[in-house]
Amino acid sequence: MSEVLVVGSKVKEAVKAAGCNTGGDFVDALSKDVEAKIARAVERCKANGRKTVRAEDV
């Protein structure tokens, strides 16, 4: 995918609300982690013979 899958401003807002600052590379790293989770969920979904990814696949 290699596109940002998270809303940077919302991520920064959540980090700030927790009393921390957001590093310049954090949003990209988080997005890559989300991308990997999606890929694993899709694999699990297909392995179970479905085409609909559900919460249980995460």
Image (cartoon, rainbow, N blue to C red):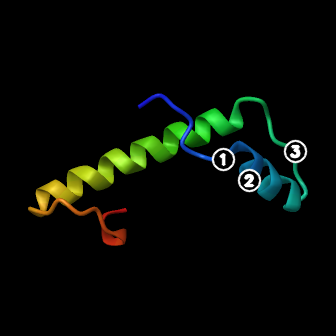
Indicate the secondary structure of the residue bearing disc 3.
loop
Measured as percent of width and height from the top left, residue 44 is found at 22, 57
Residue at (14% x, 63% y) in the render: 50
Please state which of the two labelled residues, at mark 2 or mark 3, is closer to the viewer. 2
Residue at image mark 3: 21
Residue at (28% x, 62% y) in the render: 53
Decide if residue 58 is on the left or right side of residue 45. right
Indicate the secondary structure of the residue bearing disc 1.
loop
Residue at (74% x, 53% y) in the render: 10
The residue lying furthest to the left in this view is 49
Measured as percent of width and height from the top left, residue 6 is found at 60, 46
Residue at image mark 1: 7
Q: Amino acid at mark 3?
A: Asn
Q: Give the label on residue 10, or none.
A: 2
The alpha-carbon separation of the residues under discs 2 and 1 comes to 5 Å
**In which quadrant will I find the N terminus?**
top left
